[in-house]
Amino acid sequence: FKEFIRICCRNFLEKCNLTNCVVIFSKTTCPYCKMAKNVFNEIGANYKVVELDEHGDGRRMQEALAKITGARTVPRVFINGNCIGGGSDTKQLHQQGKLVIEELATSSGCNLIYNEDMQDMEVNLYCPSLNLYF
């Protein structure tokens, strides 16, 4: 039964990341979680929040997140299914200008672009459901 619950939690986490370009796994009283949310509020990006301390399987989900990301702390911030780290990591990326919103002339949505310099290459992964780039 425990294995079944673990699989269900992992499936929930994966579904969240597949159906939302930005997902923050958070706890309501965590200052680092508020820091991450504030970054996305500042840049005007839509995001989904899963408050683990208010979810019935929050403890198990946090264990699944630890296995997926290698870190047990919250927040765990995902863009386009990829974990970018926690609150400090998210804030640092924003301060470095690596999280940017650009209005689209042809769409009512916006682009979230995460530019990571990797050997002088720019990486842009596209999230079609929200027309977001990572």
Image (cartoon, rainbow, N blue to C red):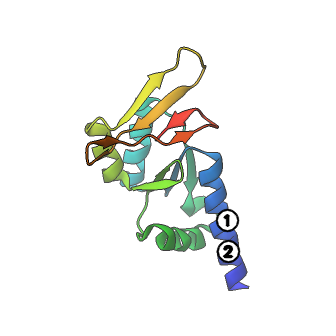
Residue 56 visible here: no
How far across and how far down the image is residue 3, in percent?
A: 68, 83
Given the image, on which type of amino acid does mark 1 rest? Asn
Spatial distance from mark 2 to mark 1, Cα to Cα?
6 Å
- The reply, left or right, for residue 26 in relation to residue 5 is left
Q: Residue furthest top?
A: 105
- The reply, left or right, for residue 83 in relation to residue 60 is left
Q: Are marks 2 and 1 in contact (CB under 8 Å)?
A: yes
- What residue do we see at 46% from left, 34% from top? 112
- The reply, left or right, for residue 68 in relation to residue 98 is right
- What residue do we see at 58% from left, 16% from top? 106
Q: Quadrant of residue 58?
A: bottom right
Q: Quadrant of residue 114?
A: top left
How far across and how far down the image is residue 64, in percent?
A: 55, 72
Give the labeled residue for mark 2.
7
Q: Please determine whether, in this image, residue 7 is positioned above or below residue 31.
A: below
Mark 2 Cα shell of 10 Å, populated few (<14), some (14-19), many (≥20): some
- What residue do we see at 68% from left, 84% from top? 2
